[in-house]
Image (cartoon, rainbow, N blue to C red):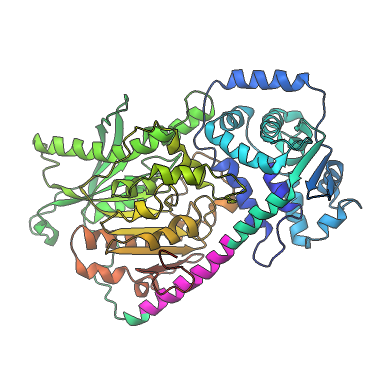
Amino acid sequence: MAFIELLLLLGLWPMSSYFNLSHLKRFCYGFFTICGTVPTRRVAMMLGVLASTLTALPAQGAERIQFFFGPFEPTIYVEDLETFAETGEAPERLAPFTNRFNDQQKQAFRGILNARYELSPIPVAQFTYSSLGENLLGKLGQVIQTDSFLNGMKGIRGSLILAADDTENGGLTTLNVLHRFPAKTIQIDFSLARQIIAENEQIFMRRDSVVEDIQQLAQAQAREKSELSLNNDPRAAGPYTWQITTLPFQTPGRPKTSVADLYLPNQPEPNRPEAAAESTPVVIISHGVASSRKTFAYMAEHLASHGYAVVALEHIETSADKFIRFLWGKEDAPGGKELLLRSQDITAVLDTLNSQKTEGDSTLTRLDLTSVGLLGQSLGGYTVLASGGAGIDPEFLAQECQSSLAERPTLNLSLLTQCTLLDLPEETPLAVADERVSAVVALNPLTSSIFGMGGLQKIQIPVMIMAGTNDYVAPALPEQIEPFNWLTTEHKKLVVMEGGTHFSFLDRQTQSVLPFSEGLTGPDPITAREPTRALSLAFFNRHLQNQPEAEQFLNQAYLNEFPTEPFNFSVVDSLAAAKTIKPIGM
């Protein structure tokens, strides 16, 4: 974390008008708030071995950071950083770097140098010793090297853990991490760093052009379909009341029994219009990592009020409770097997409902289990797309994941999670699609490598993908916008929330057990909730209940009715006319 911030902030990032330090901080915070999602055990032993090993070494600590670039080695001295952090004045040796910052950027830089990250050594060790953490640190170590120009992975790991344990000197701070690095010189591979930065700058600059293009397409569509009837407006609460019950179910391959919350609409009175419905449509909700079945309660309640039976799953291995136990060394980390189990949870809960319905459970007899809708966010977005027919190509995934940082210079954090699927034995069956799924809504899904173009083109059912432009965990352009263009299904929608982050679709009260920074979570998501509910309901009404009139609410003319500041929503059904998106095959 601290090393990433130094790498990006100490003059390496091009000082363009597009990027500023708030963008960089979001990337930096992301490495330890999000990537700590899939790690391992025996922390006490690891800490003991590490501490005994490093304390036996001569006390060093980094004195300088050198940027290796051919015969040139510009140098930053740690003591100069300390002076700047304390006083705001740059010593003569540091001035050539800080002079590239304006006053606001200098202040932000000082803030990062002085910031303390409230993480104890146990969670830090858990993450850094996990396969996911080692993957990340191994890539970082290609850029952040030892004074012998070796991969700096072990030095980064040791300095992070020991700094977190050194509460007398401030704990996990940028400067304390540098003081704990087991070498006097940190070598930065300047050429590779510039390559990474340039690549990612292009991605996010191009994203802005693409989003502007999408907004223009959406508004043109709104003008073409300007007539709008707000009768049966899907943003309004429906006429149904509901009851919540706990539904246990057993997923094959998992010894523990899983649970879900079942939001079941009450039977309408005989003289009410909605009583004419012969069956109750079903929607299953899949949460993301470190969340729970309560995370999308606001969505479940809205759908239930409109007569949907909603099943909010608890994915045991990636739940908030599991994540807390893992961070404190009480559980092993989830891996590739758990990615498959998530979709298998959907099949298992449908089988359970069908079995209970067949056995004559009077409360379930009206459920339509032959045409089911799915909604999921983040890893839940991957989950529902997989259950909806997206295929996993292990050869393509391996090619993407085994690329070195030089071959694929990207800061797309979601790839770390996608690549965990490669931990599975080669003979593992990867098909998890369920033919009962008839429509999918995926929020911030992970798609680019775990499915790729070929996998997404296997989907034949209606799909709506929602993206946030300021998502620095699963970036909108490579993970949602470009993959949307790969879909060949007849009915598809893309919703782009300008200003939205990876967390803007979540209930802030239940979104995660992790202490996210404001830079990563973004503005209060309360104003995003209403259009998210309305669009999801309209999509399910259109494709689960066969209501053609619901199509008018899946249009920009409808979205223009919403006061959504600080967000701005756009919806399109095709990117064929987008000038900034390459046609498939190019």
On-image quarter of the C terminus: bottom left
For the image, the number of numbered tags is: 0
Q: Position of residue 522 (x, y in %)?
A: 54, 55
Q: Residue at x 61, y 28 (%)?
A: 125
Relative to 502, 234 lies left or right: left
Q: Residue furthest right?
A: 92
What kind of secondary structure does the magenta stretch mostly adopt? helix
Asked where in the image residue 49 lies, by quadrant, the reply is top right
Report x, y in % for residue 573: 34, 68
Is 230 located above or below residue 187 in the figure? Answer: below
- 493 or 566: nearer the eye? 493
Give the vertical position of 273 relative to 41 (above or below). Answer: below
Q: Is residue 235 visible?
A: no
Say which residue appears at 28% left-offset and 67% top-offset.
Answer: 233
Asked where in the image residue 52 lies, by quadrant, the reply is top right
Position of residue 472 relative to residue 180, above or below, is below
Q: Please state the extent of the stretch shown in magenta in the rendering.
A: 203-222
Say whether residue 219 is magenta.
yes
| 569 up-or-down from 109: above or below | below
* Frontmost residue, 143 versus 83: 143
Residue 306 versus residue 357: which sits nearer the camera? 357
Query: Which residue is pictured at 8% across the width and 36% down the height?
Result: 360
Image quadrant containing the N terminus: top right
Would residue 376 be seen by someone viewing this image from the given angle? yes
Residue 492 at x, y = what percent?
31, 63
Confirm whether the magenta stretch covers residue 59: no
Quarter of image, res 270: bottom left
Residue 55: x, y in percent? 76, 21
Q: Name the one closer to the observer, 72 or 328.
A: 72
